[in-house]
Amino acid sequence: MIVKRIGVLTSGGDAPGMSAAIRAVVRAGLSYGLEVYAIYNGYLGMYEGNIERLYRKSVSDKTRIGGTFLGTARLPEFKEESVREVAIENLKHYDIDAVVCIGGDGTYRGALGLHEMGIPTVGIPGTIDNDISGTEFTIGFDTALNTAVECVDKLRDTSASHRRCSIIEVMGRNCGDLAVWTAIATGAEYVVCKETGLDMEDLLNTINKSALSKNHAIIIVAENMVDINYLAKEVSEKTPFQARTSVLGHIQRGGKPSARDRVMAGEMGVKAVEALIEGQSGVCVCIQDGKICTRPIKEALQDKSSVIKDKYKVFSRLG
Ligand code: F6P
C-alpha cells in the first residue's frame, strides 16, 4: 500500500521530548509529500475522532517544550477489538493510511492491536522509564535522569549538613534504570530496585559501614519496591543516621527536554516516517549501538532486566 496520509499520537505517561518527536514526524512526513494528522489525547482521540490536519507551522517552536502538545491519555479499553474498530472507522473517515504511535509499552500494545487489524503502525519509544527492550534509550529518560540527579544533589546538601540519611524514591514503574543510573550519577550509597531486590540486612550493613567514614548517606529506591517510610524507620533505629524521605514523583516527567532527548526524538521521528513509506508495520524505532533502526513491536515488549544488571555491576564497584 502506498502511504499518503499518516496520523501521529502520543499515549500513556508523557515524557520530555515527545513534542520534539511529534514535530519530527510532521516535518519528515511533509518533506516526503505526505499529509499528517494529529490524533489528540492518544487512543482516546482516535476513538472519539478528535483528529485534525497538521501543517508545517503547527509544529513551529515545539522542539524545546516539555510534555506533549497533542495531549495524552491511558485507555486500557483499547485492548478490546470493538473499541479499536470504532477508532479505525475514524481513521478511515480522514483517509488516514498509517499511524505513528509515541509512548511506552501500553502504547506499543495499542499499535500492535491496530497492526493486527490491518492498520500500518510504527512505534516510537517515549517514556521516562527506559523500559522498552531492544532500545538503549527511550525519549524522556535522559531528561528525567537529569532532573532526578539535580534533586538528589540538592537533597545531599541538606542531608550532609544534618548528618542524615536521605531516602529518595524515583519513578520507573517496574524498571530500575532511573534508580540505578541516578545512583551512579549521584554517588549514592545504596540502590533498591526490582532487579536488585531488597536485602534489608545488606542495606543496613552498607549504611553502617559508610557511617564510619561519612557524615551522611543517600539511598535511591525505585517506586513499587518498598514503603520508604518503613525503610526510614529501620535506618533511623539501626544506623547512626536519622533518615528522611522524599518522593520525586511527577516532577521527573516535566521540564524542557535535554539536548540528547531532542536529537534522538528528531532521528526517531524521521525513521518512523521512512519505515511507514517503506511498507513496514507492527515495528518500533529503536537505538542499538548508537544507530537508529526498527524491530518488531512484539520483541520490544519482552523483559529487559538483563540489561540493567550490567549497570548495577558498575554501581556495586563504586561504593
Ligand atoms: O510510565 C511513566 C510513569 O511516570 C511511571 O514511571 C509511573 O509509574 C507512572 O507513569 C505514573 O503514572 P500516572 O501519571 O498515570 O500516575
Image (spheres, rainbow, N blue to C red):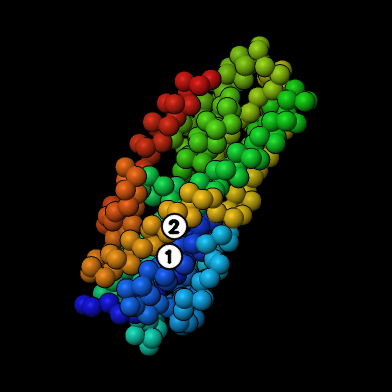
Quick check: 57 left or right of 35?
right
| Residue 114 x/y as whole percent | 32, 71
Q: Position of residue 306 (x, y in %)?
A: 35, 36
Q: Percent position (x, y) of residue 319?
A: 53, 20
Q: Amino acid at mark 1?
A: Ala
Which image quadrant is residue 294 in?
A: bottom left
Q: Residues within 10 Å of mark 2 (few under 14, many from 20)?
A: many
Residue 173 appears in view: no
Q: Is residue 113 left or right of residue 219?
A: left
Write down the residue under mark 2: 265
Residue 250, above or below 211:
below
Q: Which residue is mark 1?
A: 24
Give the vertical position of 281 relative to 54 (above or below): above
Question: Of callouts 2 and 1, which one flags the residue occurring earlier in the amino acid sequence?
Answer: 1
Mark 2 belongs to which amino acid? Answer: Ala
Q: 92 or 26, which is in the foreground? A: 26
